[in-house]
Image (cartoon, rainbow, N blue to C red):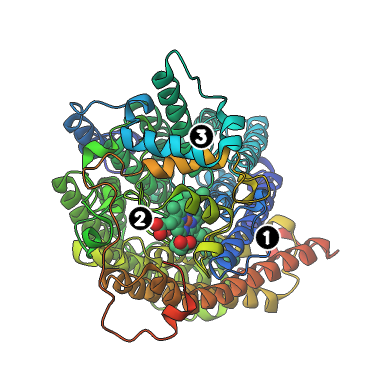
Amino acid sequence: MFESKSGVLLIAGLTFFGFAFLSNAVVPALMYADLPEKTAEELVNPQLRYQFEELGRRFPDAFVAAFGEPPTSGDVEGWWNARAAEALREGRDLYVGEGCWHCHSQFVRPVSNEEQRWGPVARSWEYQNELQRPVLFGTRRVGPDLSREAGRRGSDWHAVHLFDPTLTSTKSPMPAYPWMFDGSPDKPKREALALITYIQWLGSWLESYPLYESYTPAPIPREGLLEEHNGQ
Amino acid sequence: MQAQGEQRIDGQLVDRSIVLAYFGAALLFMFVSMLGGLLMGMQLLRHNPLNGIEFFSPGRWRMVHTNAIAYGFLANAFLGLLHWAVPRLTLRPVLDRRLSWAIFAAWQLIVLGTAGGILAGHAQALEWGETPVWVDPLAQVGLLLVAVNFMAPIVQLRGPMYVTLWYFMAAFVWTFLTYAMGNFVPQYFVSGTSAGAVGGLFIHDLVGLFVTPLGWGLMYYFVPIILKKPIWSHGLSLVGFWGLAFFYPLNGIHHFLYTPIPMFLQYGAIVSTIAVELVVTTVLINFFGTLWGRGREVVTNLPIRWFYTGMVFYFLTCLQCALQTTLTFQALIHFTDWVVGHAHLVMFGVFSMWIFGMMTYLIPRLLGREWYSRAACEWHFWLSAVGVFVMASDLILAGVFQGWSWSSLAPWYDSIAVSIPFWAVRIVAGLAMFAGFLVFVWNLWMTWRSAEEIEFSSVPVTA
Ligand code: HEM
């Protein structure tokens, strides 16, 4: 059996693989089967709506060019919600396509003082939605976790930061994304608007929103380090 | 008998040109991948000359970097090596040579499509499976055809098979299943935390059930042939294979510890990860038992040196893995460069080193020429081995500092400032690896160009 074709193919190849898949993938899927999976439309909440409308007021021309003229009568609410959901989906695709998730995680762990830095520990229901297919937990943090980022900074900050991170955070190693703009940070294209909407959504569902980073600087002397960096 | 047998094997069984074609493709994508790595590395040092150009977006190139390694370098090199090893082990040709070439062409299209798709911004949000969703079904068909093509000679064998074939057969099944599971389940069937569990399984199984069994299968094939003596213990070979088959697939969730994935599953993954380390130790004992008494070969015989250096690195990565999978270590080193160091040690230090060793051994046999420059072969080895060792130690250490910096709640920028010197060393080490690679390609080119064609069977084993 241990050296025969059927043993290798059926037991090692299929059975062991199947056992691992059942125990490690099907079990959690069944455990969370009762958590409904939300669509992007269901994810639009008042916090996000506020940020999205604020984008429209802050960058009126760019916003109209990207999403069209907001209606003044009829189903105004429906129009805004639909556009916000659209922007969320598109922003998420850009976040994936640019590999933001290889430098930013989207979960707060119960260890390493992460609760102090970012806020509540990640819970399963937060990820039960269409924008987390496949899930964007991430495995590397060159930059900070973003799952509690919503509302922490203004959309103008994000626009400038995406256009050129070193403008807001001197010496940031984050890449610049100028092609999402028409030449300057105050002229975002549809891409930038969608991406900012997505960032402003991350954590907007929490009661503790918006959550500001809280820390007392470490007591060790850090000359040179802080001077290098005048942002944050 | 030797010479005659070799001629027959060479003429009817092994298609030398396809092995060479796969090697060529593998080297091309290694080149692309290394450029991607250097670009991302320079970005982290804030000296990226191409910053702000959409097509050169470092985030996209980072994904090209890892995908070019997995599907461009490793898969191509393994396919070439399978075309050499399977017909020789079974004494039967593959199913159909035209099919082999069709697969070759299709696979290059898949890899180019993946690279093009990622660079155009169509990546899929699955680590190491960023292959755009429209590439996935094609790759799936490709993997099926690969399995059919190589299984045809294997199924005709009667009686017990050699260790290498256990690994190969299992790898055909596993690679197909792993690819399907990772690319379709979390995209179309489950989301959120459950998708995370599947994603973890995928990252891990791609290493453990595609790269690892093919790598070890080839080691079980080449080491005894080159040393001209059998594997030390058949019993340990059995333990190694079945231990890997059982425990490796259970490891996946160790990539997502402290996530909302249920804790008992996380504990299960941790325990099986430590079990894998024990299994790996038995495999290494077996291989060092095989080398016993012939230790000098490591000095004189280049392929053997590549193989055994890779094995030492393998032991180190697995030891590292047994430590880093514990929750204690995870709290500190998860998300840091520690993991990146680990990834380079295993993907370059082990599997790429083995592949380079096998190429060093096979190229003279494929081209019918002695290596143009033995010194260049030495340079390739030393630049690669020292380069990856420095890179991995540097990044592993960097990870510890980053972890401490984060948990100290210092401003985020402190963790960047502390990483800069380590990132600088990483680039230097990467350039050394890159230089070694270029020396190898140059040597290969010169060997190809050199006129004299020597008798195939007279190529010395020490090549
Ligand atoms: C020219 C030499 C190389 C350089 C400069 C380089 C650089 C890099 C960089 C900067 C990253 C991203 C790390 C981060 O996100 O912080 C990376 C990731 C990675 N590289 Fe390389 N690399 C090189 C060669 C290779 C080779 C030859 C392989 C495989 C054989 C490889 C395998 C990987 C893998 C698997 C990852 C993903 C790590 C993870 O996500 O944890 N690299 N590399």
Q: CA distance from mark 2 to mark 3?
A: 36 Å
Q: Quadrant of the C terminus of chain B?
A: bottom right
Residue A145 is labelled as 2
Total marks drawn? 3
- Residue at the image position 57 percent from the left and 78 percent from the top: B382
Tell me where residue B194 appears, x and y as whole percent. 27, 36
Inspect the image, locate mark 2, and give the three-letter code of the amino acid beneath it.
Answer: Asp
Residue A21 is labelled as none
Of A65 and A204, the residue lying toward us: A65
Circle 2: element type: loop
Inspect the image, locate mark 3, and give the three-letter code of the amino acid beneath it.
Answer: Leu
Residue B143 is labelled as 3
- Residue at the image position 43 percent from the left and 80 percent from the top: A225
Q: Residue furthest right?
A: B451
Inspect the image, locate mark 1, and give the three-letter code of the amino acid beneath it.
Answer: Leu
